[in-house]
């Protein structure tokens, strides 16, 4: 298949970006070429990247799936693109798809890297939502008997994936104190609720 040209947004250095022209090879078997319609910019993660504020310890964890270059720059970053398949398998030709690709006008990726948009979903809206299954949360509530009544503890474990995975270090840096405080408050509320329930049961039994 024929080559194509594309424009890509590169962060040359913190605070300075430029458009660069790239030549794309024609897609081979198992690949598609996508013409981008919309590219979403993350206000949190990409602001850190733009300012050169990504901690060195997080360079690898914050790499985007199709990132080129390295932090703090030059780097081609981004992970929310919606476009139209213009070359590839017949079943995908002309379909609107989402891909975890940087800000670029066209790109070639494996077929399994694109996600077909559901019918009726506008591409401009899909770029804000991305793919599903971004996070899995597991809540564990433990009830332990104590001399003073039941003691309840709550623990939440959240596993981030796809675009959300890139936010993991950012969330830990910005919100760890607030999350810990919220969890402590909820644990106290649950314990108080358990104590009232124990007292109610004891009072009913005495009567």
Image (cartoon, grey):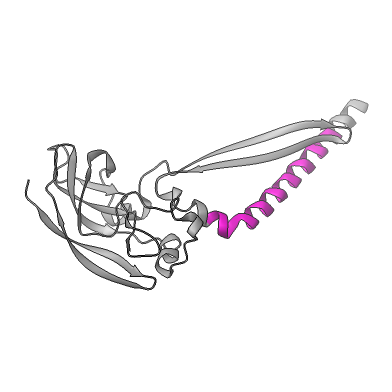
Q: Position of residue 207 (x, y in %)?
A: 92, 27
Residue at image position (54%, 43%) is: 158
Kindly tell me whether residue 164 is visible in this rendering: yes
Kindly give the residue lying farthest to the left in the view shown.
2
Q: Is residue 89 left or right of residue 182?
A: left
Q: Position of residue 127 (x, y in %)?
A: 32, 54
User: In terms of secondary structure, what is the magenta stretch mainly?
Assistant: helix
The answer to whether residue 83 is above or below residue 152 is below
Q: Position of residue 87 (x, y in %)?
A: 12, 46
Report the magenta residues as a range.
171-199
Snapshot quadrant of residue 93: top left
Residue at image position (73%, 42%) is: 190
Residue at image position (14%, 41%) is: 28
Kindly tell me whether residue 207 is visible in this rendering: no
Q: Is residue 200 left or right of residue 13?
A: right
Q: Is residue 14 left or right of residue 144?
A: left
Q: Is residue 194 left or right of residue 53?
A: right
Kindly give the residue lying farthest to the bottom in the view shown.
16
Q: Which one is nearer the viewer's eye here, 71 or 165?
A: 71
Q: Position of residue 110 (x, y in %)?
A: 23, 41
């Amino acid at each position: 298949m024929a080559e194509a040209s594309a424009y890509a947004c590169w962060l040359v250095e913190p605070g300075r970006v430029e458009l660069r022209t790239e030549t794309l090879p024609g897609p081979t078997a198992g690949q598609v070429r996508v013409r981008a319609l919309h590219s979403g910019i993350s206000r949190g993660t990409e602001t850190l990247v733009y300012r050169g504020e990504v901690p060195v310890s997080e360079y690898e964890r914050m790499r985007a799936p199709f990132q080129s270059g390295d932090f703090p720059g030059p780097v081609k970053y981004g992970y929310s693109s919606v476009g139209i398949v213009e070359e590839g398998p017949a079943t995908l030709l002309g379909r609107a798809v989402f891909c975890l690709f940087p800000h670029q006008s066209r790109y070639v990726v494996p077929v399994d890297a694109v996600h077909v948009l559901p019918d009726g979903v506008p591409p401009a809206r899909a770029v804000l939502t991305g793919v599903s299954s971004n996070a899995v949360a597991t809540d564990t509530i433990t009830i332990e008997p104590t001399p003073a009544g039941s003691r309840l503890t709550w623990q939440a474990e959240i596993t981030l994936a796809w675009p959300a995975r890139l936010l993991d270090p950012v969330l830990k840096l910005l919100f760890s104190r607030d999350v810990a405080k919220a969890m402590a408050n909820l644990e106290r509320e649950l314990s108080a609720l358990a104590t009232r329930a124990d007292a109610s049961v004891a009072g009913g039994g005495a009567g």
